[in-house]
Image (tube, rainbow, N blue to C red):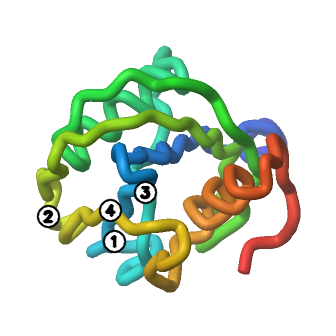
Amino acid sequence: MVTELLKERINPGIGVGVIVLNSDGEILLGQRMSNPGRGLWSLPGGKVDPKESVIEAGIREVAEEAGISVKIEKFISTGYEKFYGLEYLTFGLITRSDEKPKATEPDAIGDWQYFPFSRLPGPLFGPSERIIRNYVKGVMRSEEPLG
């Protein structure tokens, strides 16, 4: 019992969100079709699998969710998230692509679209919002409350 409590406390999930920019500087976002965050707009991303690096997870998630093959340019931020009863250490990555996204997991993300930063849709999924905010502000680490 104590071991399980300690394990939960010191081992939050590890997640990744990827900012995909096109040549016009627009950001790729998709509307979530399932929980957590149904109806919210999100970056491509998800859980880092066991024995997978954050970079590998970012590449895999963009390919699985949006059907785009990418190379990650750089790590841009990290944040500790508490949302929907879950705890995550979330890493933000960035890449560029002009490939047209596809809704390869329509039960998870209904549609992918590129948006200018000046006209982002809303509301945004909390971890994605933090990654985007950190990127815009040039902040590498953030633990301020979501929302």
Q: Secondary structure at mark 3?
A: strand
Say which of 31 and 2 sits in front. 31
Residue furthest top as drawn:
51
The quarter of the rendered structure image containing the C terminus is bottom right
Q: CA distance from mark 1 to mark 3?
A: 16 Å
Residue 69 horizontal/vertical position (percent): 24, 29
Q: Which residue is disc 3 drawn over?
A: 27
Query: In percent of the image, x 14 and y 58: which residue is there?
Result: 103
Residue drawn at (13%, 53%), measured in percent from left and top? 102
Few, some or many C-alpha atoms within 10 Å of disc 3 (few <14, some 14-19, many ≥20)?
Answer: many
Q: How many residues crowd around disc 2 within 10 Å: few (fewer than 14), some, or many (20 or more)?
A: some
Marker disc for residue 32: 1
- Which residue is at 38% across, 22% downward? 71
Contact, mark 1 vs mark 3 (Cβ under 8 Å): no
Q: Amino acid at mark 1?
A: Arg
Quick check: 126 left or right of 3?
Answer: left
Q: Amino acid at mark 2?
A: Pro
How far separated are the C-alphas under marks 1 and 4?
Answer: 15 Å
**Image height of 127 relative to 8, above or below:** below
Residue 11 x %, y %: 73, 38
- CA–CA distance between discs 4 and 3? 5 Å
In three-dimensional space, the C-alpha distance between marks 4 and 2, rounded to whole angstroms, equals 17 Å
* Numbered badge on residue 106: 2
Quadrant of the image for the N terminus?
top right
Q: CA distance from mark 3 to mark 2?
A: 20 Å
- For label 4, the residue is 114
Tell me if 100 is positioned left or right of 81 in this view. Answer: left
Q: Earlier in the sequence, mark 1 or mark 3?
A: 3
Are the residues flagged by discs 4 and 3 in contact, CB closer than 8 Å? Answer: yes
